[in-house]
Image (cartoon, rainbow, N blue to C red):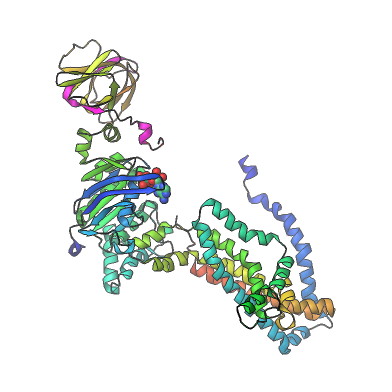
Amino acid sequence: MAETRHRGAAVDIRAVTKTYGSFTALDDVSLRVEPGQFMTFLGPSGSGKTTTLNVIAGFTDLTRGEILIGDRSVGGLPAHKRNVGVVFQHYALFPHMTVTGNLAYPLKLRRVAAAERDRRVAAALDMVRLTDFAHRYPSELSGGQQQRVALARAMVFDPPLLLMDEPLGALDKKLREWLQLEIKRIHRELGTTFVYVTHDQEEALALSDRIAVFNKGRIEQVGSGSDLYDRPQTLFVGRFIGESTVLTGAHETRGQETAIRVGDEWVAAPGLAGEGRQALLVRPEKITLVREDAAADPALNQLSGRVGEAIYLGSGVKYEVTLADGSRGVVRMALTDRPFALGEPVRMRWRKEDARLLPDDGSSLAAQSGEEP
Amino acid sequence: MRDFFSPGRNSFWLVLPALLLLLVALGYPLAQVVLRSFTDPEPGVGNYVWFFSRPVNLAVFQRTFVVAGWVTVLCVVLAYPYAWLMTSVGPNMRVLLVLCVLVPFWVSGVVRTLAWVILLQDSGVINRMIMAMGFEKIRLIRTQTGVIIGMTQVLLPFMVMPLYAVMRGIDLRLVQAARSLGARPMLAFLQIYLPLSLPGVFGGAIIVFILGLGFYITPALLGGPRATMLSTLAQQQVLQQLNWGQGGAMGVILLVATLVLLAFAGRFARRRYQMGAGGK
Ligand SMILES: Nc1ncnc2c1ncn2[C@@H]1O[C@H](COP(=O)(O)OP(=O)(O)O)[C@@H](O)[C@H]1O
Ligand SMILES: [Mg+2]
């Protein structure tokens, strides 16, 4: 589809609020997606990702705010006039039409001439590598094949914007990884703006130019994967993206640093604390484990604990360390000649500037799984 | 445990009691009816020749199909939006809607038909309303229209329930998908929802039509001589004139017509809708 190459449309979400009765599903959300960008909405289940997608697609009315696609406000525009491709988690292929029938459907609605229609259906099938399955019914395809048909159908009419709601959520891991590569390739070849929803942070990091992290109907932070991983603005984001050791406790200011007490040891990070409880967040690859007899180094933070778990990763090893206050440290290291044994007393060490000082927003892994309100 | 509870090859005996009952209570009398239609009063196809040579019989035969056809069409038209509403409301409202369909169903057909007699008769509620509005009163009781109205009401649940069962399985995201692909709401309905709901329409229509062909009480009470249907005619032959041969022939003709129709409908439905509904 070389000749249909185009820049995608920008999406501008301006102060959008959506309420259901007294429940606020989206709370004053603003976000800009640049033309041709691969934007991912990441967040726990129930955080408002689908609702945002639905207001963009026109399936749901918004309570307040405005949405622009391209330069056009789409407030009064019904779903069928928005010219936006949508891929649903459960494929939503028409069961009474063949693969070809499904792909031809949006073209027939646009009164594309038969010859041109056939050509575009063939090109779209080629794009998702399903040419041999053109005459099958959806029920005769595997889940991965159905999702590729759904993708082809959403882009066959060349929309400048493609919305995908957890399209790979129902597939197993290997297939998911392969389809991620396919989606990435298709995005590169088409130049269309993609808005992709997932609750899987690895998927978000693998695919996206930018990621918007959703939490309770708000956007916590928008940025590239490395922005979010290295410079999370909130504890929620730091916890949601990648693994981390999170330390909380009483804090005090020491010059330009803030120190936090863990058990009866103190660790510090650059920066001044704001209001309320504070937390330190350290990424696993920034930490090294040493044995108890190692010489102390005043330039480094240091915490004592015991090895609770050692997980062999192939490329290295991940240790979980139980700290004095019961919290859990996560350390990733290269394989060494003398691996640490379970239960062995150890010290975790990291440079002060490798920890991030953030207000403790009470986020927890349980809350992020969507199981806790 | 699993072997005992899961129906296996040797579980055929489970259906034996039902099969036996059917054989005794349905198979035997049916065989008798067929036999008598060919032997009473004398062996041969005389009863069938008689049936098809009398214009009155043919008129009744034709009317039976016309009435059943109208009832089927009316049931589809009334049940379709109703069943759709059942799929789209909350659980409490749904229970209420199901009850509205089923409660009349628990009241005997005779009682309901008598209610229609009261409503439809010349000085009945409907005609009094029509006259109150300043129109001529219309004859409803003992007409084909009256029969159709009464039968539609009695048979409506048989249309609503299969339709609801199929519609409940239709994934509404398919309609959303169609909208996102550029279909106006009406087109999305006609091209996506309607085709997927057709198995329910067919299922219900076949049941209603076949029940309608053999309907007895309602046509007898609401119809009268000018709106007689085949089952009433057969009943008169057998019970009033003790003419087992001719009555039996009518029964057999109705049965054969029904079976032929079923065979056609089954074939059509299979060919066109083998994909089934849903899409989940
Ligand atoms: N039609 C609706 N009526 C009431 N609440 C809804 C409706 N749709 C979504 N919600 C609520 O809005 C919140 C956000 O939902 P959603 O956007 O689907 O979350 P996500 O896609 O991030 O998992 C959820 O708490 C959900 O229960
Ligand atoms: Mg969702």
Horizontal side of residue A267 vs B117, given as left or right? left
Image coords of residue A270 (percent x, y) = 16, 24
Q: Quadrant of the N terminus of chain A?
A: bottom left
Q: Quadrant of the C terminus of chain A?
A: top left
Q: Nearer the viewer, residue A221 or A289?
A: A221
Residue A16 among those drawn in magenta: no
Horizontal side of residue A220 vs A172, given as left or right? left
Which range of residues does the magenta coloring cover?
Answer: A341-368
Q: Nearer the viewer, residue A220 or A194?
A: A220
- Examine the image and state in which quarter residue A330 appears: top left
Residue at x-position 59% and y-position 55%: B96
Residue A182 appears in view: no
Q: Give the number of callouts.
A: 0
Give the answer, above or below, for where B196 lies relative to A13. Answer: below
Image coords of residue A369 (percent x, y) = 37, 36
Residue A192 appears in view: yes
Residue at x-position 25% and y-position 45%: A207
Give the answer, above or below, for where B84 lies relative to A43. Answer: below
Image coords of residue B21 (percent x, y) = 76, 59
Give the answer, above or below, for where B183 lies relative to B6. Answer: below
Residue A363 among those drawn in magenta: yes
Give the answer, above or below, for where A353 lies relative to A55. Answer: above
- Examine the image and state in which quarter residue A245 appears: top left
Image coords of residue A221 (percent x, y) = 24, 39
Horizontal side of residue B24 vs A107, given as left or right? right
Residue at x-position 67% and y-position 50%: B11
